[in-house]
């Protein structure tokens, strides 16, 4: 029942990752779904807690679960229970998952992302940690390089896709130094004005995203085939980037890519991992 709950949550909230997980060995999927369900729960704390204090309380609860301090409560929570089991069975580094929860404190406040380096650090601690844990569940260790490249690609692309959502609630994930480089004003983002300066800053972030995707594709040729399912869903990012590169692109109306097309991209990447970078 716990495993079914996590699988359903990933199916409904991150369908691309759900499809990619189906390419993993059957005996590893339950742990992967637990890890991804945890990532979903942590990532949507800002959606559920509009004020900082409730968000901090939720993050603290997860930190204590990961540190083994709320065993009874964790057992009653399907995602926490499944995650604790996955940590024990696959030797996941709970301290890294605690660091992930700590990094997501940024989400509950409206402080701006100061630099590209700060966004890279956030990506490493959040998405990068999830990719690294996924490779561990799939039976490999030491896959830090590809996990970090994947984390950068995922986070940068999410910053582009979720720009309207972040702007509507006063958040700024676009780094201030990148905006300053192109003389783009944060005020225009919060007013949802797609100025030429903002368009140039977004184009720079797309280039960085593509660079990381290409690196993932290159590194995937040298990793064990068994861990490739951890990265397959990244193939669905290509169509989003392509749509954003069109002249008609409106940053505050992000493109919608049909599910069937994303599924096709994931299936092709399963046959040829280099397609992740296209």
Image (spheres, helix red, strand yellow):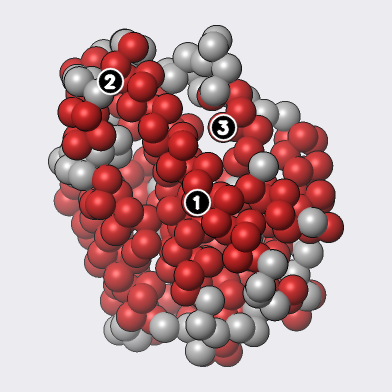
Looking at the image, can residue 110 be seen?
no
**Residue at horizontal 43 percent and vertical 42 percent from the top:** 208
Residue 53 higher or lower than 93, as above or below: above
- Left or right? Give the position of 266 relative to 250: right
Give the quadrant of the C terminus: top right
Q: Marks 1 and 2, how far apart in space?
A: 25 Å
Q: CA distance from mark 1 to mark 3?
A: 13 Å
- Among the 4 quarters of the image, the one containing residue 191: top left
Q: Kindly identify which numbered label has been placed on residue 247.
A: none
Considering depth in this image, is 258 or 6 the residue closer to the camera?
Answer: 258
> Can you identify the residue that label 2 sits on?
189
Q: Is residue 149 left or right of residue 103?
A: right
In terms of sequence position, does the residue under pointer 3 or pointer 2 come before the other?
A: 2
Task: For mark 3, give the secondary structure.
Answer: helix
Whether residue 202 sits left or right of residue 242 in the image: it is: left
Residue 141 visible, this orientation: yes
Q: Measuring from the top left, give residue 43's x and y in whole percent.
A: 41, 51
Look at mark 1 in the image and give the residue it sits on: 212
How far separated are the C-alphas under marks 3 and 2? 19 Å
Percent from the top left, x then y, of residue 182?
Answer: 25, 23
Q: Is residue 274 above or below residue 190?
A: below
Residue 224 or residue 211, whichever sits in front = 211
Q: On the rendered image, what quadrant is the N terminus found in?
A: bottom right
Q: Secondary structure at mark 1?
A: helix
Q: Please tell me how crowded label 1 is: few (under 14), some (14-19), or many (20+) other residues with Cα within 10 Å.
A: many
Q: For the residue labelled by badge 2, is the local secondary structure a helix, a strand or a loop? A: helix
Question: Which residue does the image show at 67% across and 50% down from the upper left?
Answer: 276
- Residue, x 60% and y 24% (percent of image)? 243
Q: Determine which residue is flagged by label 3.
A: 241
- Image coordinates for residue 78, horizontal then vertical, percent: 54, 69
Between 79 and 250, the residue placed more toward the observer is 250
First in residue order: circle 1 vs circle 3: 1
């Amino acid at each position: 029942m716990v495993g079914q709950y996590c699988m359903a949550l990933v199916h409904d909230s991150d369908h691309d990752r759900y499809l990619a997980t189906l390419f993993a060995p059957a005996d590893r999927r339950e742990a992967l779904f637990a890890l991804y369900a945890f990532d979903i729960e942590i990532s949507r704390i800002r959606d559920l807690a509009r004020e900082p204090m409730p968000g901090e309380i939720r993050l603290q609860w997860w930190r204590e679960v990961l540190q083994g301090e709320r065993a009874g409560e964790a057992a009653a929570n399907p995602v926490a229970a499944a995650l604790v089991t996955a940590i024990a069975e696959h030797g996941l580094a709970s301290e890294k998952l605690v660091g992930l929860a700590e990094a997501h404190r940024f989400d509950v406040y409206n402080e701006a992302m100061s630099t590209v380096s700060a966004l890279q650090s956030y990506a490493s601690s959040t998405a990068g940690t999830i990719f690294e844990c996924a490779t561990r569940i799939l039976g490999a260790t030491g896959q830090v390089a590809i996990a970090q490249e994947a984390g950068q690609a995922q986070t940068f692309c999410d910053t582009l896709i979720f720009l309207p959502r972040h702007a509507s609630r006063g958040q700024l994930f676009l780094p201030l130094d990148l905006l300053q480089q192109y003389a783009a004003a944060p005020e225009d983002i919060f007013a949802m004005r797609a100025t030429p300066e903002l368009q140039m800053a977004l184009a720079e972030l797309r280039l960085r995203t593509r660079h990381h995707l290409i690196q993932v594709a290159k590194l995937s040729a040298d990793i064990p085939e068994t861990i490739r399912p951890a990265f397959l869903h990244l193939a669905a990012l290509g169509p989003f980037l392509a749509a954003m590169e069109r002249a008609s692109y409106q940053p505050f109306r992000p493109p919608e890519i049909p599910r069937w097309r994303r599924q096709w991209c994931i299936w092709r990447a399963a046959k040829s991992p280099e397609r992740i970078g296209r």
